[in-house]
Amino acid sequence: MRRNPFIGWCLAALVLCTLAGCSTVTSTFDKVMAAVGIKGTRLAWKEVLITASDGANLNTPVAVDVVMVLEDASLEKLAALPASKWFQTRSDMLKTFPGTYIYKSWEVSPGQTLRLPGSAFGSPSVVGVFVFADYLTPGDHRMRVEQLQNGIIIELAARGFSVLPYKAE
């Protein structure tokens, strides 16, 4: 099997940047991956915090899914989906579009805080990340996450939630 010399040079450059302490290693890696046909940005969370206020979801546990989207074609489908529909059709979507989504799921009780290490999410190349929360109140209860480095805080309140950037220590 003959190897592509371009890929070899790119990997060598990446290793040299890493050894030299290059500040653009992640950016360089993303460019190399795009050049060889793998799109997206590498997810690099160190920690994710999920906190539920005392009266979260009208004082009822909240199902929370963090969904990592791996293909552009599926991004728009997910961006238009309310949380209620995601939770109803999740297993069908995963069967219909295998290899398109990776998701992690938790149930959080009012007053509870979860500290999740970044390793729980891995470091896939993603085209988007969404958080869905299964609230009893009406609404989309879906948020797109722009923070793909360091970490995020998901704050669950009585009738909705927010996602904030978080710099893990």
Image (tube, rainbow, N blue to C red):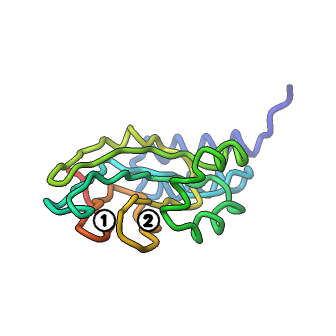
Identity of the residue drawn at 14% across and 53% down: 111
Please tell me which residue lies in front, 39 or 92.
92
Q: How many residues crowd mark 1 within 10 Å: few (<14), some (14–19), many (20+)?
A: some
Left or right side of 89 for 121: left
From the image, tell me which residue sits under label 2. 145
Amino acid bearing label 1: Pro
Identity of the residue drawn at 44% across and 52% down: 66
Please tell me which residue lies in front, 76 or 27.
76
From the image, tell me which residue sits under label 1. 165
**Outermost residue to the right:** 1
Amino acid bearing label 2: Val
Please tell me which residue lies in front, 47 or 5.
47
Give the quarter of the image for residue 95: top right
Q: How many residues crowd mark 2 within 10 Å: few (<14), some (14–19), many (20+)?
A: some
Q: Are marks 1 and 2 in contact (CB under 8 Å)?
A: no
Q: Secondary structure at mark 1?
A: strand
Please tell me which residue lies in front, 113 or 164.
113
Identity of the residue drawn at 73% across and 50% down: 36
Image x and y of residue 48, in percent: 30, 51
* Separation (CA) of disc 1 from disc 2: 9 Å
Image x and y of residue 160, in percent: 31, 70
Give the quarter of the image for residue 23: bottom left
Relative to residue 103, is residue 133 depicted above or below?
A: below
Label drawn at residue 105: none
Image x and y of residue 98, in percent: 69, 43
Left or right side of 89 for 151: left
Identity of the residue drawn at 46% across and 40% down: 122
Q: Secondary structure at mark 2?
A: strand
Locate the N terminus and report the quarter of the image it occupies.
top right
**Outermost residue to the top:** 1
Disc nearer the start of the sequence (1/2): 2
